[in-house]
Amino acid sequence: MSEERAVLTRTTPSVRGGPTLVVIGTGGLARGLCYALATTTRIPLDVVVVGRRQERAAEVCYVAATRAALAGAPVAFHPKTADLSSDDALADLLSRLAPDGLVLAASSQSPWERTTAPSAWTSLVKHAGFGLTLPFQAELALRAGRALAAVRPAAWFVNACFPDAVNPVLAATGVPVLCGVGNVGLLAASLQAALDLPDQRRLHVLAHHAHLHAPHGPDEPDGADEPDEAMAWLDGEPVAGTGKLLAAQRAADRAELNHVTGLSAATLVLGLLSGAQTDTSLPGPLGLPGGYPVRLTGARLELRLPAGLALEDAVAFNQRCAIRDGVVVDGERVRFTGPAHAELDLPADFHVAELHQITGQLHQLRAQLRDRPPFL
């Protein structure tokens, strides 16, 4: 018996008759999702956790399976490894697993590198804005989305890697993507808690990844009434002081927030698989830039904008906020807006078809800068 098969046997047997969910990734968000599924799942479900390293995938599955056993949840967790840099390997794996849905929570650029391995590269990202990493965030998303569409076209795809900007890239290149998780979803959950709401049916949130941080500096006033602060409506009326309501979330350690995002993502996934109606706010729905209030009935998604807010105005708001992140994706064009692009010998504006070339250039630049000390 192989080591992988032995791990599967010791954790949880397959759940007969239930859907199959594939989660690519073994980091904090993937763990938050799996650990939440372990205690909230009420339908038979098989979860396959795919990672680059067998021991990490097996660890996630052990913890999740044990939590599921304690919770009496009808969900099984199975570790798999794959060469995530290979189109063929991903297509072969997804063809064999035949999932009902795929959640991607892995990329070629860790958001934690600035704390775990600070270098001139992480300083550059801080200077230029997180948007500079868009090519790295989109790299695996494009590969996984294309593989899924080719071998399992009826399955839905949820991308958790910078979906505010990556999902528009996916849409522009013809890769079907349902939505993302986190970002505006985290903000909506935080506002739900701050407003003491039982759910988000009465709450509509319009916000971008950039709103995970306050839109003003530390020495400036709260900014709750600034036009570029996250926007929310309760029962159709604007919510005042969203900055103050989000203060606890913005002060929390980023790793801790995966526990909230993981549970929010689990709620979304279970709704997708069970056919339940879910009212929430999500990033990158149907390839749109930024985050919007939505309604899902199973895997059918529709926008849930508050009365009086036109879609073009909602998109324009998100695109304006995207500038703070350092990248704007508008149709088939990608534009770096941060102050550093002129120093990098990279085009500030390029077509999505050129993304592969830009990614290659950034791989070379990152390799060079990782050997140098941080400058900020």
Image (cartoon, helix red, strand yellow):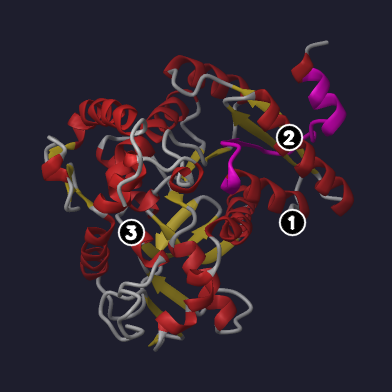
Instruction: Give, as a single range, the part of the protein colored magenta.
Output: 5-29
Count neighbours of disc 3 (C-alpha within 10 A) and say few if under 14, some if 14 to 19, many if 20 or more. Answer: many
Q: Residue at x 57, y 62 (%)?
A: 277
Q: Is residue 83 left or right of residue 109?
A: right
Residue 158: percent from left, percent from top: 48, 45
Inter-mark Cα distance, 1 to 2: 20 Å
Secondary structure beneath label 2? helix
Q: Which residue is mark 3?
A: 290
Q: Nearer the viewer, residue 366 or 34?
A: 366
Per the image, is 13 magenta? yes
Per the image, is 273 magenta? no
Farthest-out residue, top? 1
> Is residue 168 something one can see in this rendering?
no
Residue 234: percent from left, percent from top: 46, 84
Inter-mark Cα distance, 1 to 3: 28 Å
Q: Are marks 1 and 2 in contact (CB under 8 Å)?
A: no
Is residue 274 positioned above or below 244 on the image?
A: above
Q: Is residue 363 left or right of residue 69?
A: left
Q: Residue at x 31, y 52 (%)?
A: 376
Which quarter of the rendered picture does the N terminus lie within?
A: top right
Q: Is residue 312 left or right of residue 196?
A: left
Q: Which residue is mark 1?
A: 40
Q: Earlier in the sequence, mark 1 or mark 2?
A: 1
Task: Give the foreground label among 3 and 2.
Answer: 2
Amino acid, disc 2: Glu
Q: Which residue is mark 2?
A: 59
Secondary structure beneath label 3? loop
> Is residue 120 something one can see in this rendering?
yes
Amino acid, disc 3: Gly
